[in-house]
Image (spheres, coloured by chain):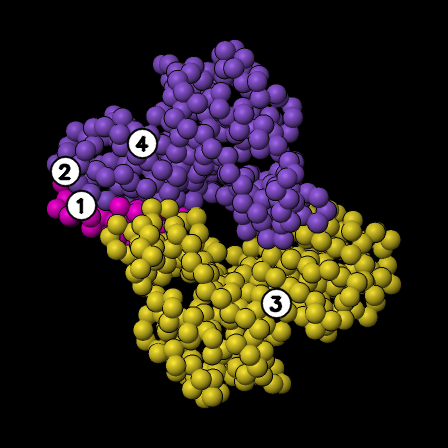
Chain colours: A purple, B yellow
Amino acid sequence: MRRILLTVAYDGTGYSGFQAQKSGAKTIEGELNRALQSLTGEEILVSGASRTDAGVHALCNQAVFDTESRIPGDKFTPALNVRLPEEIRVTASREVPPDFHPRFCSTEKTYAYRIYNAQIPSPMRRLYTCFSYTPFDIERMREAAAYLVGEHDFKSFCSVHAQAKTSVRTITGISLTEEPLPGAIEDPSGTIRYRDRDGYPCREIVLRVSGTGFLYNMVRIIAGTLMEVGRGAIPPEKIPEILAACDRGAAGPTAPACGLTLEVFRYLEGADFLQEIV
Amino acid sequence: MRRILLTVAYDGTGYSGFQAQKSGAKTIEGELNRALQSLTGEEILVSGASRTDAGVHALCNQAVFDTESRIPGDKFTPALNVRLPEEIRVTASREVPPDFHPRFCSTEKTYAYRIYNAQIPSPMRRLYTCFSYTPFDIERMREAAAYLVGEHDFKSFCSVHAQAKTSVRTITGISLTEEPLPGAIEDPSGTIRYRDRDGYPCREIVLRVSGTGFLYNMVRIIAGTLMEVGRGAIPPEKIPEILAACDRGAAGPTAPACGLTLEVFRYLEGADFLQEIV
């Protein structure tokens, strides 16, 4: 029996998340299993590193499976891609030790949450961003974000449906960046750097959260809370209080899934044979 | 009777182009007509500036229509957006003189053609780019593009199905730019500036073509021809010969529709009351 590690990119639009479901709903895992069965003739069940939610995207999720096939590790990439729907692509494949599992390694993941911040939603960005016309104050969002970096009990930033034993996690870094949209007028001295002619924000804001582990809905609740800070509904200095409450009700709403993408997956320990996988 | 000008953005994926069809196929124009009828109760037929093909996108197509309604010009934007599918958004609306039509003004349009140039196609960019793993030589593509700038007979770059009276058009500018994709390694001295670890290109190439008028499929044939130049199949200095041939067979293939976006629509004359519309 050989173990193969896949790096998988997907557009989560229209999928019921990564994990295969008993209902038979369309999932990333289900499509990978189907493609592997078509390729090898074996009943293969892949095991993923991040069980991303319905509608969430990924550039680099990790999944392993065991096979009796003799297909060289790197050849699974092209062989699976011709069998997968175009919303899913294997970007790398390789043989790993039989006891290797990305979920049992020390890893760091980076999620990006994108906000399309403009007067009118964008047809071409609608599937990969969360739309808002609110004039967010990014500096205040950065102030608030800084309180979240480090090891904390993130119970307030975790879905009440989560089943993890502990809600202590470590965020290794948070950044907020902005890019102008077509037609933006730059005002470097203003609170909103990029505006349209009518004074509305005209930019895409990207929140990136890196950490060694995440709770269910954690990045989306962080995004929803920072948006509340950005619009002035929560003062940045209230974040320590929200953390201390250990109560989901203390934080802001869960931001929509479509804005979220798993962008980077880094192995810190337990996988010296792998280089960084993007 | 009042005339209203709309600026319309759309994701052309899944649409049979801009122009309404007798077959009843889903089109941008058809959806605008339906939304206007729902809003005003009138049988309204919009008239568009650019009849973009099936699968082509736009940030700023222009359309006019006549109405008896008393809705203020700028209020059509929100009123139509709640009645349109999310693939289509009106980004601006205003009343214009009753004889105004964007097709009869002197205008300049900019189209962007995007090539996702990497080892593996991207699920999240698949709808808005044309995929190719070919290591295109962008410098040669730029050399070739320079021959196309100016007034020429573009018959070789026009679909044989076109019905225009003359195939003489003016291209006011062409540019080729590239952006690294996640995981790209930069080599400023190499022919391919951004590559992945395996040596494949790892970038998005954007070809922008500006002109005062375009023939049917013209930008897609220019894109297809420049890709042939980039892969070494056509030498850049052969472009004048291809133009002179006035024969569709002399140019390269028509690049896929999904890579094309109408990005900028500028009024040069005949619309002094309008500012640049993006």
**At numbered mark 3, what does the secondary structure look like: helix, strand or loop?**
strand
x and y, in percent, of residue A257 in the image: 50, 35
Name the side, left or right, on which B126 lies relative to B101.
left
Q: Is disc 2 on the same chain as disc 4?
A: yes
Q: Is disc 3 on the same chain as disc 2?
A: no
Disc 2 is attached to a residue of which chain? A
Q: Is disc 2 on the same chain as disc 1?
A: yes
Q: CA distance from mark 2 to mark 3?
A: 56 Å
Amino acid on which the number 3 mark rests in the picture: Lys
Disc 3 is attached to a residue of which chain? B
Q: Label 1 belongs to which residue?
A: A73
Please name which of the two marks, 2 or 3, marks the residue nearer to the observer.
3
N-terminal-most mark, 4 or 1: 4
Return the residue nearer the eye: B85 or B206.
B206
Q: Label 3 belongs to which residue?
A: B109
Can residue B140 be seen in the rendering of this structure?
Answer: yes
Amino acid on which the number 4 mark rests in the picture: Ala
Q: Residue furthest top?
A: A245
**At numbered mark 2, what does the secondary structure look like: helix, strand or loop?**
strand
Q: Residue furthest front?
A: A189
N-terminal-most mark, 4 or 2: 2
Q: How many marks?
A: 4
Name the side, left or right, on which A105 lies relative to A236.
left
Please give the name of the residue rendered at 28% of the width and 56% of the height, measured from the top-left corner.
Answer: B200
Q: Residue furthest bottom?
A: B245
Name the side, left or right, on which B105 lies relative to A105.
right
Return the residue nearer the eye: A223 or B269.
B269
Amino acid on which the number 1 mark rests in the picture: Gly
- Asked where in the image residue A137 lies, by quadrant, the reply is top right
